[in-house]
Amino acid sequence: MKQARVLTDVELKRLLAVIALSKHAARNRLAIMLSHLAGLRVGEIASLRVGDVIDSDGQVRDQIRLSAAVTKGGHARVVFIGEKLRREIDRFRAEWERSPMINTPLLVTQKQTAFSANTLCQLMSKLYREAGLNGASSHSGRRWFITKLAHAGVSLKVIMTLAGHRNMSTTQRYVEVTDRHTRAAVELL
């Protein structure tokens, strides 16, 4: 089975530029960035509630707690919110006309209902297509997240934990290796 394409930094910038011109740009950008900067699966993103990312004081949380019911493996996990993702969430909040209730969906459709995983998957695929990124899918952000961490020298065990994988071999399959990476490795000698 062919894996989702991992975007280059230039391609991610192009995608974000295309999204900026789209209807519901802030929502669409946050969906993509939750995938890229937190490694969330599309179903996990679709399940998020405002209270999962914003605390009762109106501040962006330090972490997202995913219940076992919304994860692929059926195991609850914690997803940390880094500074870049915090800025993305704040950027999205700036678009709110009024603060939504804590238990309302974080991302909503045009009909103001929660996304299903399938509908959000279709939206992401449409955004990638509009940016001319053939082979990219809703899983591209997750692969980008894992690949970036691996190439930054983060321990595979840490990446495995962040991804919510139970087996290291699963995490290893996500890491994209290119000629540039293999050449850089040889140059370390």
Image: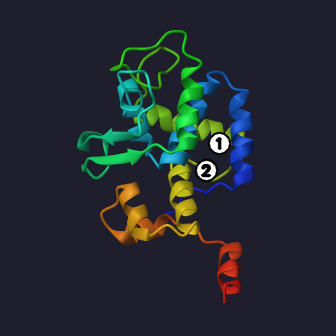
- With respect to residue 179, does 40 lie above or below? above
Q: Residues within 10 Å of mark 1 (few under 14, many from 20)?
A: many
Count the marks.
2
Q: Is residue 10 left or right of residue 80?
A: right
Please indicate whether residue 144 sits to the left or right of residue 119 in the image: right
Q: Amino acid at mark 2?
A: Ala
- Secondary structure at badge 1 equals helix
Viewer-proximal residue among 174 and 120: 174
Q: Residue at x 40, y 30 (%)?
A: 116
Disc 2: CA contacts within 10 A as few (<14), some (14-19) or many (>=20): many
Q: Quadrant of residue 84?
A: top right
| Residue sticking out furthest to the top | 98
Estimate the x, y position of residue 53 in percent, counting from the top left: 41, 31
Mark 2 to mark 1: distance in Å? 6 Å
Residue at figure coordinates x 44%, y 36% from the top left = 118
Q: Which residue is mark 1?
A: 128
Quarter occupied by residue 185: bottom right
Residue 164, compared with residue 98, is above or below; it is: below
Residue at 37 percent of width and 70 percent of height: 168
Percent x, y of residue 98: 50, 9
> Dot 2 lies on which element?
loop
Mark yes or no: residue 184 visible: yes
Furthest residue to the bottom?
Answer: 189
Where is residue 30? Give x, y as percent.
55, 33
> For this view, does 15 lie left or right of residue 1?
right
Q: Quadrant of residue 55?
A: top left
Callout 2 touching callout 1 (CB < 8 Å): yes
Upstream in sequence: badge 2 or badge 1: 1
Disc sitting over residue 151 in the figure: none
Residue at the image point whose x is 58% and y is 66% from the top: 152
Q: Residue at label 2?
A: 136
The relative height of residue 56 versus residue 99 in the rendered view (above or below) is below
